[in-house]
C-alpha cells in the first residue's frame, strides 16, 4: 500500500473514532435524573432535572441552574397588571419582565382566579431555562420517577397587594 494512502486511511480512521466518541458522549454518556416536585393541595407539579439544584421551603421553593435561578411562590392577589396572558400546560399564564428578571404567573384554580403561582426567574444566560408547572401529568410523573418532594403542603398563600 502506498504510504500516502496509509496516512490518509489512518487519518480517516482517527476522524471516525473522534466523531463516534463525540456522538456517544452527546447522546448516551450522561445520567439524567428527574425529581417530581408536587402539590396535591394545588393540583400541580414540576418535573425538575439534575441540571438544577433546588431547595424547598414551607411556602416556596428555589431552583438554580448555572447562573440562572428562580423562586416559586403562591400569592393571593391575582395577576400582575402588566402581564401578557395565554394558556400553558393547562394553566392560564401571565408573563412580564423586569430588567434581568422574567416573572411567570400561573392561575392555580379557574374558580379562584386570585390565587397565582409566581416564578420570579433571573435570566442571566440562555440555558438552562425556567421550569414550568404541569397539571394532568402529575400522576404519570409520580409513577415514572421515584424521587419526589411535596411543595406548598402546609402554609396558605401569602397575601400581597
Image (spheres, rainbow, N blue to C red):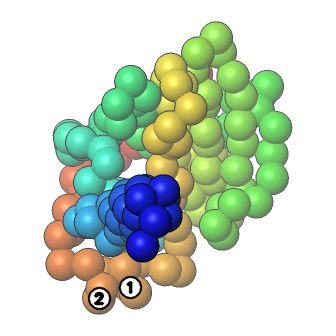
- Which residue corresponds to mark 2? 143
129 to the left or right of 152: right
Which quarter of the figure is the C terminus placed in?
top right
Residue shown at 57%/21% (left/top)? 101
For disc 2, the neighbor class at 10 Å (few under 14, some 14 to 19, many from 20) is few
Residue 43 lies in what quarter of the image? bottom left
In the rendered image, the vertical position of residue 1 relative to residue 7, given as above or below: below
Disc on res. 4: none
Residue shown at 58%/15% (left/top)? 100
Camera sees residue 37: no
Q: Position of residue 54 (x, y in %)?
A: 24, 43
Q: Position of residue 70 (x, y in %)?
A: 42, 32
- Which secondary structure, mark 1? helix
Pick the front one: 106 or 126: 126
Residue shown at 66%/69% (left/top)? 90
Q: Residue furthest front?
A: 2
* Tag 2 and tag 1, C-beta contact below 8 Å: yes
Disc on res. 139: 1
45 to the left or right of 147: right
In this rendering, the count of numbered labels is 2
146 to the left or right of 109: left
Pick the front one: 58 or 63: 63
Pick the front one: 119 or 158: 119
Which quarter of the figure is the N terminus placed in?
bottom left
Foreground label between 2 and 1: 2
Q: Position of residue 74 (x, y in %)?
A: 45, 42
Residue shown at 27%/62% (left/top)? 30
In space, the residues marked 2 and 1 are separated at their CA atoms by: 6 Å
Q: Position of residue 158 (x, y in %)?
A: 40, 34
Amino acid at each position: 500500500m502506498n504510504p500516502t494512502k496509509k496516512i490518509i486511511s489512518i487519518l480517516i480512521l482517527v476522524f471516525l473514532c473522534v466523531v463516534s466518541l463525540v456522538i456517544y458522549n452527546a447522546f448516551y454518556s450522561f445520567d439524567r435524573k428527574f425529581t417530581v416536585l408536587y402539590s396535591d393541595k394545588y393540583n400541580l407539579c414540576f418535573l425538575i432535572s439534575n441540571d438544577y439544584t433546588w431547595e424547598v421551603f414551607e411556602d416556596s421553593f428555589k431552583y438554580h441552574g448555572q447562573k440562572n435561578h428562580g423562586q416559586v411562590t403562591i400569592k393571593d392577589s391575582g395577576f400582575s397588571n402588566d402581564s401578557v396572558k395565554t394558556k400553558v400546560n393547562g394553566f392560564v399564564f401571565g408573563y412580564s419582565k423586569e430588567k434581568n428578571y422574567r416573572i411567570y404567573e400561573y392561575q392555580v384554580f379557574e374558580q379562584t382566579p386570585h390565587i397565582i403561582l409566581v416564578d420570579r426567574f433571573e435570566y442571566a444566560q440562555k440555558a438552562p431555562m425556567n421550569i414550568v408547572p404541569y397539571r394532568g401529568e402529575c400522576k404519570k410523573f409520580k409513577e415514572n420517577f421515584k424521587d419526589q418532594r411535596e411543595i406548598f403542603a402546609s402554609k396558605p398563600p401569602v397575601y400581597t397587594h
